[in-house]
Image (cartoon, rainbow, N blue to C red):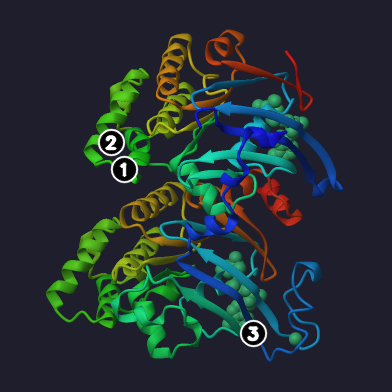
Amino acid sequence: MENHYLLRLEHAAKTFVLHGLGGKKIMGFRDINFTVRRGESVGLAGPSGSGKSSIIKSIYRTYLLSHGHIWYDSKYYDGIVDISKIPERAVHLIRTNEIGYISQFLRVIPRVAAVEIVAEPLIRNGVPEVEAKKVSSDLLKRLLLPENLHDAYPSTFSGGEQQKINIAKTIVWRPRLLLLDEPTASLDTHSVSIVMGLLKELKEGGTAMVGIFHDAQIMNDFADTVYNIDRGFYVEQ
Amino acid sequence: MTNNIYNPYLIREDEKLKGLTEPYVSIQNLTKIFGPSCPMCIEQTGPEHETNKCCTCGSIVALRKISIELYPNEILGIIGESGSGKSTLVRLLHFDMDVTYGEMYLDPLILCQEVIDHTKKDIFTLSAFEKRKIRNKLIGIVYQNPYMGLKMDISCGGNIAEKLIEYGWRNVNAIRTRAMELLNRTEVPIDRIDHSPKTFSGGMQQRVQIAKALSTNPKILLLDEVTTGLDLSVQAKVLDLIKKIQEKLKITMIVVSHDLGVIRLLATRTVVMKYGTIVEAGLTDQILEDPQHPYTQLLVNSQL
Ligand SMILES: Nc1ncnc2c1ncn2[C@@H]1O[C@H](COP(=O)(O)OP(=O)(O)OP(=O)(O)O)[C@@H](O)[C@H]1O
Ligand SMILES: Nc1ncnc2c1ncn2[C@@H]1O[C@H](COP(=O)(O)OP(=O)(O)O)[C@@H](O)[C@H]1O
Ligand SMILES: [Mg+2]
Ligand SMILES: [Mg+2]
Ligand SMILES: [Zn+2]
């Protein structure tokens, strides 16, 4: 049982069809196969436009797969599901309970304080408000977000500060599977090392990850296994 | 080969997944035809014909066999061009007019004591009295046009009181206290309680509508273009209010909006409508980032 994978892409392929352009087809990726075990960190590398982000978005079901399967061993559903095919409601429940996604940009309701944004997933899952805010505030402190910003609205924050909120609001609830698409791109070196430290702690706690990092050194530090993607194909290192 | 890696017997069947995600409200084949209607109405309308007007009898097919499921504590977004049937849908769910045909079922979970015996019954077939009872107990609405949701010749507090009285409240002091509490929650200045909503700004009128809709603790809230026509800072306040209400009160909502930004921030799932028909439905981020239907692609590409 321990050898069981958490995530497995099987002949996964994605083609975009642009109807406005006479049905033009754009290849996102094709025949992608890899597995991720519990607590494993997998990196996706490759040139810009090779399909890395599309793969991550397909795992999160932001993109619909054209072919193949994305098997995921769900705790909530107590069994393996094909994320690319189950009902949207089921995907939503898995997203709120198991799979987190951190992109490059923060998107939140205006006029909600930073600490409240981070605490929200905890409160939703039944953590008392005071405690959730304390945990969130501590996390933001670790990420070196100035304390006077904790109660401010992120719409006025700098790119890096917003990104810290973005990272915190997902890692705070310790997802079982964490998807990362260049989460550190707008952060300074010191902040990057703090984020990498937090990711390590998550990993030790059993979180599996699939991540894209531009910086080769960060990628090295992050990943147990790196898959190189080129023009939508998986290529051997 | 792949079978060695995973055990296919562990794979959850769709049936089992469904069992864990029962909808609160299930709407099937909902259809609304304005006009005499004829057997060709459905066939001759919809996106393929690029019209909602039946060319045989001239009726307007405002809704064409819509099926929607609503889940506990979720926000469902509805987008689509003007005239696609969004407001008609919302008003049918509030029993403001009769459906042409279609069914609506409620999960026992959502039904409270008085209406519990309507499980498994098509709600649209109940008597007007029973529908009113269900509406009073379960459903709140905020109309696109504040003049439809509020009486402008009585005070703002009076509008809320009216709804509470319809619900069965009798104690004048209790009613006033409740109205103040709601205006407080929706951030309408309490000292305006005795003024007519006619004298309020658009954003305030929408917030009074929200206060009125919330007064009877509905389980379902229908919001039709609540932020349209408001300036950006007022929009932000209303959005924040809706999100807070949803989180704190765990209300299931339908949010109709032209504004994809509003839908992105609020809705978990989104339905795209055109000429009375659902052309695409999916998780909101999927609809906005990987739209499948030509119409959705057009909509998204022209707005983002
Ligand atoms: N009472 C009515 N009698 C006749 N036709 C009606 C009536 N109400 C709505 N319609 C028609 O039904 C269609 C759908 O109208 P509806 O108000 O639901 O559109 P909508 O999607 O809400 O549009 P908008 O985005 O402009 O609010 C339109 O063609 C409209 O003219
Ligand atoms: N939503 C989309 N619609 C159409 N084409 C897309 C979309 N997302 C990505 N693509 C295309 O798919 C290919 C892979 O892109 P992407 O996954 O973003 O690459 P990477 O992250 O490796 O830079 C590119 O040709 C890109 O233009
Ligand atoms: Mg990318
Ligand atoms: Mg309308
Ligand atoms: Zn007809």
Residue A98 appears in the figure: yes
Q: Nearer the viewer, residue A107 or A122?
A: A122
- Residue at position x 54%, y 72% in the image: B27
Amino acid type, residue under disc 2 in the picture:
Ala
User: Is residue A6 found left or right of B238 in the rendered image?
Assistant: right
**Tag 2: Cα neighbours inside 10 Å, few (<14), some, or many (≥20)?**
many
Q: How many marks?
A: 3
Kindly identify which numbered label has been placed on residue B34. 3
A110 is higher (above) or lower (below) than B44: above
**Tag 3: Cα neighbours inside 10 Å, few (<14), some, or many (≥20)?**
few
Kindly identify which numbered label has been placed on residue A132. 2
B300 is higher (above) or lower (below) than B129: above
Q: In which quadrant is the C terminus of chain B drawn? A: top right
Residue A112 appears in the figure: no
Q: Nearer the viewer, residue B165 or B10?
A: B10
- Residue B129 rendering spot, x and y as whole percentages: 38, 90
- Residue at position x 66%, y 33% in the image: B4
Amino acid type, residue under disc 3 in the picture:
Phe
Kindly identify which numbered label has been placed on residue A123. 1
Disc 1 and disc 2 in contact, CB within 8 angstroms: yes
- Residue at position x 53%, y 22% in the image: A40
Amino acid type, residue under disc 1 in the picture:
Ile
- Residue B186 rendering spot, x and y as whole percentages: 30, 58
